[in-house]
Amino acid sequence: MQEGFPVPPGICIPVDFFLEAITPYAKGLRTLTAAPDLEDAGQALLASRKIGALLEDLALPPGLLDEIVLAVQPISSTALAVRSSSILEDLLSSSFAGQYQTRLGVVGKGEIERAVLACWRSYFSPNALTARARFLGPSYREWERNAQGIAVLIQPLIDAECAGVCFSVDPVSLDPEMIQVASTWGLGMGVVDGRLPVDTARVRRTNLAIEEINLADKRERLQPETTGGLQRVPVPEELRRIACLPESWLQRIAQFGLAAEQFRDHPQDVEWAIAKGKMWILQSRPITTLSANVAAAVRFPVDWANGEEPRHFWQLEPIHDWAETALLPIQVDFVSLRTEGGQEAVAYAGYKETRWRKAINGRIYIARAESSLDPEAQKKRSAAYRSLLEGFETQGITLWDHWGPEIVGATERLAGFSPDHASGQDLAEHIEDTLAAARRNWMIHTLLPRRFGLEKLVTAYQQISRQERAAAEDEIWSLIQGEESVHSRLVEALYDLARFAQRYPPIVKLLLDRPSDVFTALHEMPEATVFLFHFGQFMAAYGSRMFCGSFGGRSMPVPWREAPELVLEMITAYIPKGGSLQIDSPKNNRERAHREAKGRIEAMCSMAKDSAEVENFRRRLAYARRNTVFLDEHNHYIDQLAEGQFLQAVIYAGRWLARRGDLAQWQDIYWLRIVETLEALRAPGNQDLESIVVARKRKFDRWVERISPASLGLPDPGLPERGQEWSPPQADDIEETLENRLRGQAASRGIGWGRARIIFESAVLPDVAPGDVLVAKYAGPTWTPMLASLSGLVLEGSSIADHVAITAREYGIPAVMGVFKAVERIPEGAWVKVDGTRGFVEWEE
């Protein structure tokens, strides 16, 4: 409770009262508990019976019962849980789980007295005597050493809708990456004592992905009797074979399991209950059956700055689509700087909420927190910002109209820097210049509302379409795509390069073979001269975008111009190979999708009866189309170029320091902090950079070995509405139970067919051919230039509003998102049908 967990209120009857109550029997107890053979179950049973006879008239100390009754009145007017808690219980080496008595559904003064005495007597149960003798050793057999005794907790009984146990490490498979959750309807007593069938689920620690759910036939549940005690009642037929926990609840329980493990610095066995939309934590004890190696594997030490930080809820933030391991020091510093830009946005716009970011073992975690602005300042700044946005909308000015020129101008200015004759001071100033631009750009990035102008468009669309709100919101995304943007120009330029290469078969063969000296070979090929010229123009325009390169076995982010061979790899996505067909121009596809959307709009407007509503809709649509272009523009100039130009400046500095001999290789610059880099450039030779790099690499290797949990700190005990999310997504209805059919979220209309290309890692470019169906867990911005070559897209993650879905809709690529276990279920090379209108995926070998 002190740490902020949602624990039911209660009182404790300390051990002192137990010791006072058994004082008259001390001599006999000392003799019986000192027996040398209590490890033998038969001898323990005999000793326990003798102790039971000795304590037959055991009573509460005078006045204690009245004090208990008075103390429990403020915490509960209903049934109570009276629970034993031995001081020697729940140790790292042994738990004594289930050895002591608990009484649930206790009602009335007399039942409270009987329950407390039952807990005290259970200290001398046969199992408890044997367990202490076996696990605690001979030194604990003497009565004097056993006199620590037992306390009693009294709490209100949570009348649970469902309850169970969460093991923060799967105690069966002993896989440190897996959390196991057991659940059943009603009270959790049926789970912990094994009386009732339970659902079990395995959840991945690093991302809370649900790996497996096994549903039981839950015929009965335990619930409190109104007059006291518990009763078994039948589970309604419609609930017996469905999951107790919807996915969001299951993940919340796993988050609490991770939180308990963090606070206790050891894997935990957590008893939980859910009642009236809220999580309750009833107990947390160490899992004692794990090896030291397994327990150590999940240790994720956190250096909290203060006592407030761990009370917040921190989630692992995927900074980039390649951030599947620890970040390097230079990246951590850049993320911190972006955070400062976000904080400036909070102050500028008067936001009530801010985001904290914290680097922990090379990973970035993010937490929501209240803004530090005082209420009056927050109110004034918020009103001013809303007025600014409303003014933009009234005048037809988009956010990119307002801030875009500043951002584009900064990137063009930074692109003009030449390192050829730059001094260390020049390079330091250039790094600081890129940082200042990135900080400013990230402030603007945080200020850009993603749905600016859409809410009023959805309302206008509802008026003429007569659709429900949810359906209108889904449909509207397909109506506003197709405008030309920096991203569409990039994709179309890649396609043009591929078509140009196809004029010369030797170039195509070289690109598809991908030799390590591909550029040397191209330069030696006379027919490649014009291709290389156009490739150079492409790199001049887009070379500051981001890739993840591999140096010395470690992944490091680099601008495209530092890894041009990967750009050639993207070009091959548009070159037919292995029997695949030549696809149509992405520009034609984009314009076709635009025309189809326009046709649907015209058909709908022609049927509308109110001309004023139609005019309002057309005006809102035109504005929203212009405004959504900024989703592409800001991704290119802020998410891509701002960091790309910073890293390019760092690479220039690394090469300069390597030439001076301060670094063994230029890539070692990634292991320095920004302040160290600036100091080395301005005062070279003052630091032993190589020693710093070696030490950082060692620390990084330790970071990489750590399994980063999906969350830290305390989740919200309040749960979302259950809704209809009763079971795993692939079993929602009869259609989805087919072996070769999955359902997800329709994200881009149309039906596409193609060969399945299963991609397990988002850190590498997918090896696809024109017309393939890409199946992956997630697709980040590094992949989007290649997506226009596909005939379909199937993702386990993402949503209809992210960059990947937008790209799919722009080019008319049928796409389905949120497809449960698509990567695992769909075979490599299968013939896949993607129904992006209805949200289904089917395949055949």
Image: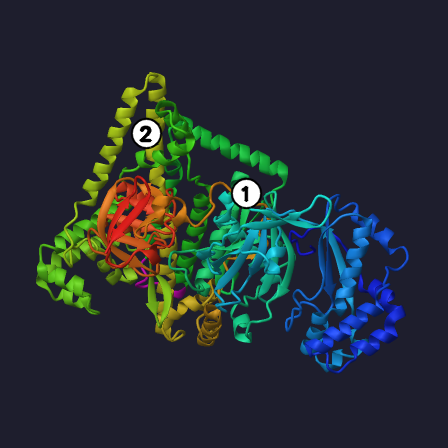
Amino acid type of the residue tagged 2 in the rendering = Ala
How many marks the image carries: the answer is 2
Q: Which mark is residue 636?
A: none
Check disc 2 and report the residue beneath it: 622
Q: Camera-side residue: 263 or 585?
A: 263
Whichever of callouts 1 and 2 sits on the residue coming sooner in the sequence is 1
Horizontal and vertical percent position of residue 29: 83, 74
- Quadrant of the rendered image containing residue 539: bottom left
Image color mode = rainbow
Q: Label 1 crowding class (10 Å Cα cut-off): few <14, some 14-19, many 20+?
A: some
Marks 1 and 2 in Cβ contact (< 8 Å): no
Q: Is residue 535 visible?
A: yes
Image side of residue 383 versus residue 395, left or right: right
Q: Secondary structure at mark 2?
A: helix
Image side of residue 368 versus residue 492, left or right: right
> Residue at the spot x=19%, y=68% of the render?
515
Q: Is residue 416 visible?
A: no
420 magenta-colored: yes
Q: Camera-side residue: 690 or 81?
A: 81
Q: Camera-side residue: 492 or 728?
A: 728
488 magenta-colored: no
Amino acid type of the residue tagged 1 in the rendering = Ala
Q: Which residues are magenta?
A: 418-424
Check disc 1 and report the residue beneath it: 347
For the stretch drawn in magenta, the main secondary structure is loop
Horizontal and vertical percent position of residue 593: 24, 37
Horizontal and vertical percent position of residue 771: 20, 51
> Residue at the spot x=23%, y=58% of the render?
829
> What is the CA distance from the residue labelled 1 to the residue labelled 2?
32 Å
